[in-house]
Image (cartoon, rainbow, N blue to C red):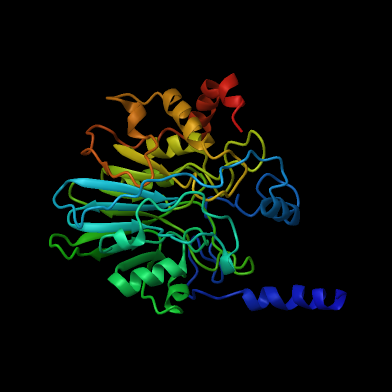
Amino acid sequence: MVILLALLATIVPRFLDRRYYAGPASGHFDGARFFNPDGEDTAGVPGGGWRGGFLWRQLTGSDGRPVWPKSVAVMPSRPPARVTGDAMVATWIGHATVLVQTQGMNILTDPIYADTAGPFGLGPRRTIAPGVAFSDLPRIDLVLLSHNHYDHLDLATLKRLWRRDRPVIVTPLGNDPILRAQGIVAQAADWGESLPVSPPAGGGPFEVTVTRNYHWGSRWFADRNRALWASFVVRLPGGNLFFAGDTGMGDGRWPAEAAKLGPIRLALIPIGAFRFAPGQMSSGSHIGPAQAVDVFRGLGASTAIPIHWGTFRLSYEARDTPPKILGAAMACSGIVGERPDKRFAPVGIGRPVAVPPVVAGLPPRESVMPQRSGAALSRCMDTPALRALR
């Protein structure tokens, strides 16, 4: 048994490693693996300690984590076939999956309909059913695929979408071979590159730009950072759509970089999976609600929807902790204007939301660095009620 385990430890990682992308070195690619150019804060074990112990706690839930409900009731909706003109309707389907309909185009972000987020049916189990049944999805024209983690790149769902709709799939470099192996065609691009997309209902073409965020990629541990991760800006006449993907904060400058592409009407920003130890407010790989407010401000976005919470249990915090902290962070943010507390607030899964027009006069707050605004938010949010949240 010892010999077998030693052989497996030597052979299996190499077998599971994959060279997804080959190209010239750049400011975020060393010729073999991608990296965050603003420093590395994603390689350590979330919450500290030994990686094996972390994996064991994740599998067994043996870290004293608050209990999640086994299931949450949801009333699925049936979206319209198309939304034309400058009107925009967004429906949060669950986790990082959002259907955005505008200008006659149906856009779907990181689609996952699987019951579990992991290989071979393993991994965290879905707590709430998708807010739109797959059979009720309208024809999808564009899929934004942020990176290759199992809770974002769900091959079974992507195969169903490809067979049914043949959508344009835009993803960062190195993720396209994973899809190609399943007969799915995707267009891969580097940070800063743009691709045209034309909706079948006419209009356009519109432009999708792959933009920087702060994360990492892997399907099997050994293939870490063989494929790139990204956020996206879809440039639209009525105001742009920004999808953050899955991200930590990094240097905090990437939201302003996305904002330079034009006014952002709707931003999809993650707020969950940030706590891997009691009291933790963010991790290297994931922003928490307070940092999500920094991202919102840096984007200068008119409206934002919090995503990446409450669907799959990926970390320590209680299911409803992320939106509660987000509400407090927005109240402490100093953001002014008409009903600022509603501009970045939770929406119900499966509930279509009409996105208001772009609010004028909201330039990106490039001068607000996360260290400064984050410290101010922390002081304002240091209350008994928030300290009691798990």
| Image side of residue 326 versus residue 223, left or right | left
Q: How many marks?
A: 0
| Image side of residue 211 versus residue 251, left or right | left
Quadrant of the image containing the C terminus? top right
- Between 24 and 14, which is closer to the camera in this rendering? 14
Q: Residue placed at 60% from the left, 63% from the top?
A: 122
Query: Relative to 279, does residue 57 appear above or below in the rendering?
Result: below
| Image side of residue 34 versus residue 327, left or right | right
Q: Position of residue 266 (x, y in %)?
A: 30, 43
Q: Position of residue 292 (x, y in %)?
A: 46, 39
Q: Position of residue 295 (x, y in %)?
A: 42, 40
Would residue 382 be seen by someone viewing this image from the given angle? no
Q: Residue placed at 13% from the left, 60% from the top?
A: 203
Q: Residue placed at 71% from the left, 50% from the top?
A: 57
Q: Residue placed at 26% from the left, 60% from the top?
A: 138
| Image side of residue 88 versus residue 16, left or right | left
Quadrant of the image containing the N terminus? bottom right
Query: Relative to 231, does residue 21 appear above or below in the rendering?
Result: below
- Between 215 and 357, which is closer to the camera in this rendering? 357
Q: Position of residue 33 (x, y in %)?
A: 56, 67
Q: Residue furthest right?
A: 2
Q: In the figure, residue 6 lies in which quadrant? A: bottom right
Query: Relative to 14, does residue 271 appear above or below in the rendering?
Result: above
Would residue 172 be seen by someone viewing this image from the given angle? yes
